[in-house]
Image (spheres, rainbow, N blue to C red):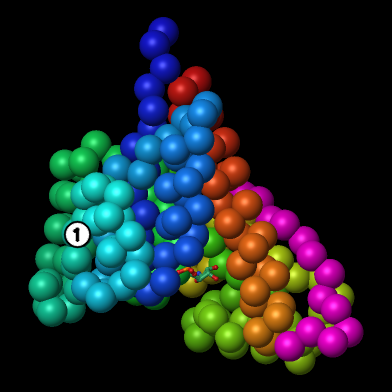
Amino acid sequence: MCKRTRRVAVLVSHTGSNLRALCEAAAAPGSEFAVALVISNNSGSLGLAHARKLGIATTHMSAKTHPDPSERDRAMCRVLEEHAINLVVSAGYVKKVGPRTLQAFERRIINIHPALLPRHGGPGMYGAAVHRAVLDAGDRFTGPSVHYLTDEYDAGEVIAQREIPVLDNDTVESVAARVLEQEHLLLPAVVQRLAAEMQS
Ligand code: GRF
């Protein structure tokens, strides 16, 4: 049977450093996936600009372009289908994905979170708040988690994590930077694995 490169869509809102890591991994020899589409709710996001520079198809979809959330959900589903997407990766996407899209991509839509779920997840737990919670709790370890995306924030089954120690002199900024480095290793590895598994 001939092997097919799996087509990945990435959802981003701001910086898109995980998107960059995915694009780099997709370009490496032996990659099982290509980043075929980037969707953002933020027309000014760096992630969207990076995708355009690489010639990747992009779509801006927000409450401005689609004021009705269920119409937005339908439009997201449609664009994913039009681009024959096999796997959706939410990487720093700050909006909820609608029920139609979640259902159409059940167990083919994943998210990255910067803490060891089930610790420090849920509504309001993003960015600095997550790392602040890790430090306040006195956790000895932290690190990113990749999990299946469901309609409940950070509650889907965990696929993989990477643990790093929290250091005595860590600040929110230092721990955030070290976790992000790990995200850039973990996410492409998980996407590569899932893409490979889709071959069988
Ligand atoms: C990452 O820390 C990710 O875990 C979280 O949002 C951040 C996105 O960073 N969900 P970037 O936009 O990929 O740089």
Q: Is residue 97 left or right of residue 141?
A: left
Labels in figure, total: 1
Which amino acid lies under the numbered mark 1 shown in the image of this protein?
A: Thr
Secondary structure mostly seen in the magenta stretch: loop
- Magenta residues span 159-171
Please tell me whether residue 136 is drawn above or below residue 70 in the rendered image: below
Which residue is located at x 38 percent, y 49 percent? 88
Secondary structure of the residue carrying numbered label 1: strand
Image location of residue 200, percent across then percent down: 50, 20
Provide residue 84's location: percent of width, then percent of height.
24, 37
Residue placed at 77% from the left, 61% from the top? 163
In the image, is residue 196 above or below residue 45? above
For residue 57, say whether it is visible.
Answer: yes
Q: Residues within 10 Å of mark 1 (few under 14, many from 20)?
A: some
In this orientation, which residue lies closer to the viewer: 156 or 30? Answer: 30
Instruction: State which quadrant residue 10 falls in.
Output: bottom left
Q: Name the quadrant of the N terminus.
A: top left
Q: Which residue is mark 1?
A: 59
Residue 104 visible within the image: no
Question: In this image, 177 relative to 110: left or right?
Answer: right
Query: Residue 190, image x and y in percent?
Result: 57, 44
Q: Is mark 1 within 8 Å of ligand 1?
A: no
Q: Does residue 159 appear left or right of residue 92 in this picture?
A: right
Q: Per the image, is 161 magenta? A: yes
The residue positioned 42% from the left and 71% from the top of the image is: 15
Q: Nearer the viewer, residue 111 or 45?
A: 45
Query: Which residue in the rendered view is the most extreme toward the bottom?
Result: 136
Question: Closer to the camera, 117 or 183?
Answer: 183
Q: Quadrant of residue 65?
A: bottom left
Q: Would residue 148 appear left or right of 69 to someone viewing this image? A: right
